[in-house]
Amino acid sequence: MKAVIFREHGGIEKLEYADVPDPKISADEVLVRVRACALNHLDIWIREAAGFPIEMPHIGGNDVAGEVAAVGANVKKLKAGQRVIISPGVTDGTIDEYTTSGWDSASPSFDIMGRKRQGGYAEFARAHHSDMLPVSDKLSFEEWAAIPLVTLTAWHMLVTRAQLRAGETVLVHAAGSGVGTMAIQLARFCGASQVITTVGSDEKAVKAKALGADMVINYRKQNFAEEVLRLTGKRGVDVIFDHIGPETWPKNLLCLARLGRMVACGATSGPQATVDIRPFYARQHAIIGCFMGGRKELLEVLRLVEAGKLRPVVDRVFPLKEAAAAQQYMLDRKNFGKIVLKV
């Protein structure tokens, strides 16, 4: 099959469009003919330096949408030709205290497609049958690929972890990111009274408002903490949705209301942040770590998508062989919404 691989860590020049062997499935696995695969920052981090052993040559790609090509001998509920997405958070079928309680992403067996295992930058991908989720034809494969990882993450952050309530105020960082576009929609869905977001350009500000943001701050022109305090009458926001890291953490605590919660799922600006912890305890803040989510949450997310309550935001579609250009497009922060590879 054709796939985009890298044989060693490094820059985008390490990505290679090549012929590789087709995946072999076990009795409990399903082979998927990949039709689309969305990009995530994780693809770039793994390519640059995984920080743990991975199989080389490696295939990235966390968000897979396609059709069932073949099923293992023990798989009874799926058939060839069925439209599916592969859960971005995958397991080996292990049942433990975390998977049985809905906290799949806390299980030692939890992994992400394209992380330690081979991903979806390829014509075919494989995964355990329990990670296959049938979808309708209401959306294109490119749209379905744009949904799983970011929507699940946003739901886990705002609903499960922050427990966002109607009438509360929310700050969503980076409205143009895939997870940011979903966080804005979910905040509206949960009944937030005010959704404030940050962007890096005036063009993205217009798109963020069209998506549901009440107020948009261009962080290149304004100090977002000062603006949040101004917009909220110095009260601050109840919930901060963060996936940036050291660029935002110090200011986040300055514009978080008393008893406010900051949920964090990533560190696109680096791994270490220095903060003044005095506002943290004096104003009784909560900083909550978030990592993907569980199957039950993903099923709820897909139900909302099927019902038209949430919609994917696709910025641009690249052919698979142009994966390097697609990753550079993401690195240049040109996108508003998801970047997708068409296979």
Image: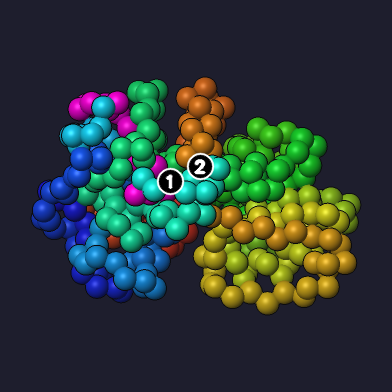
Measured as percent of width and height from the top left, residue 133 is found at: 37, 33
**Residue indicated by mark 2:** 100
The answer to whether residue 319 shows anywhere in this view is no
Crowd rating for badge 1 (residues with CA inside 10 Å; few <14, some 14–19, many 20+): few
* Type of amino acid under label 2: Thr
Of labels 1 and 2, earlier in sequence is 1
Q: Secondary structure at mark 2?
A: loop
Q: Is residue 249 left or right of residue 313?
A: right
Q: Is residue 72 left or right of residue 288?
A: left
Name the disc covering residue 185, or none: none
Q: Is residue 178 left or right of residue 18?
A: right
Q: Nearer the viewer, residue 295 or 228?
A: 295
Q: Is residue 113 above or below residue 53?
A: above
Q: Is residue 133 above or below residue 231?
A: above
Measured as percent of width and height from the top left, residue 254 is found at: 79, 65
Q: Secondary structure at mark 1?
A: loop
Occupied quadrant, residue 342: top left
Q: Nearer the viewer, residue 239 or 329?
A: 239
Q: Main secondary structure of the magenta part?
A: loop
> What range is drawn magenta here?
77-92
Q: Nearer the viewer, residue 75 or 282?
A: 75
Q: Is residue 196 above or below residue 262?
A: above
Measured as percent of width and height from the top left, residue 78 is found at: 27, 27
Quadrant containing the C terminus in the rendered view: top left
**246 is within the stretch colored magenta:** no
**Residue indicated by mark 1:** 95
The answer to whether residue 20 shows anywhere in this view is yes
Look at the numbered discs 1 and 2 and tell me whether their residues touch, using CB distance below 8 Å.
Answer: yes
Tell me the residue at 58%/63% (across/down).
244
Occupied quadrant, residue 67: top left
